[in-house]
Image (spheres, grey):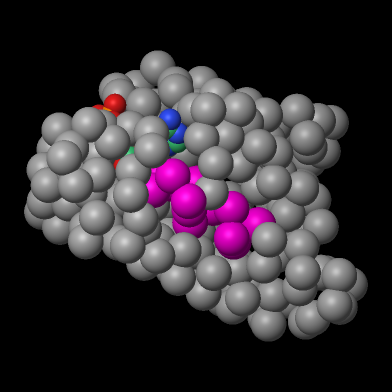
Amino acid sequence: MSFVVTSNDYVDYIQVAAKKIAENGDYISGLDAITGDGDHWANINMGFENLVAASDEMRAMPIDGVFKKIGMLMMSKIGGSSGILYGGAYIAASKTVAGKAEITSEELCAALEAMVKDMMERGKAEPGFKTMIDSLYPAVEAYKKALAEGKSDAETLDAVKQAAIDGAESTKGMEAVKGRASYQANKGVGHLDPGAVTMSYQLECLCDCIKAKL
Ligand code: ADP
Ligand code: MG
């Protein structure tokens, strides 16, 4: 039997991720100041503050409703590319788990896969373009592989987390194809993509939160 993620579990995770993001303001703003326009942390932090404010409301919803609510809040409260990309991704995830009050590990994997597909279509971006996709995509691939190999929940969560972190780290050597870093002369080479780093924070917190409850 795989783990189950309830709305309560997901809101608990959102609160942990919000804290991790809030604590890394100077670092993330610094990364975006080098490769972008410096607002990525302010954008994503504002989004997470709004999600935390909606915690009680979301705890009372089924998980598909939670994903939809997160998508709508991110779309309306986060400025910049990330608001549209996260908003669309969460709404796509909510459709994947339609009618479900809670989700299994397989369903969480499918929801994350729906998110990355939506981000790639909406952002017209692929893995290797030096964006947040470079953390989420390998995490989803690692998740699918772990499930196919019948890994334990703990091993699966560790593999997803590590792939997300390694993926974010790999953006350092990439030339940006999409996003503001692509307008720079050196295409951001030598610097981490801020969106990939905040994506890896979220996936790291998600995996850690679920693992702590196994
Ligand atoms: P903006 O670039 O509009 O100022 P943010 O600063 O909030 O928006 O977010 C920047 C991050 O968004 C980048 O670091 C990158 O990870 C991601 N990003 C930008 N453009 C795209 C795109 N077309 N597809 C996927 N991700 C993108
Ligand atoms: Mg920006």
Q: Dominant secondary structure of the magenta stretch?
A: helix
Query: Seen in the image, is 51 located left or right of residue 25?
Result: right
Query: Seen in the image, is 6 located left or right of residue 10?
Result: right
Residue shown at 60% from the left, 27% from the top:
121
How many numbered markers are drawn?
0
The residue segment tinted magenta is 128-140
- Quadrant position of the N terminus in the picture: bottom right
Residue 133 covered by magenta stretch: yes
Query: Does the image show residue 211?
Result: yes
Query: Seen in the image, is 150 located left or right of residue 18?
Result: right
Residue shown at 72% from the left, 52% from the top:
108
Query: Seen in the image, is 211 located left or right of residue 16?
Result: right
Query: Does the image show residue 48?
Result: no
Q: Position of residue 195 (x, y in %)?
A: 34, 46
Residue furthest toward the front? 185
Residue shown at 30% from the left, 61% from the top:
172
Which quadrant of the structure image shows residue 74?
Answer: top left
Q: Is the residue 167 above or below the residue 149 in the image?
A: above
Q: Position of residue 179 (x, y in %)?
A: 33, 32
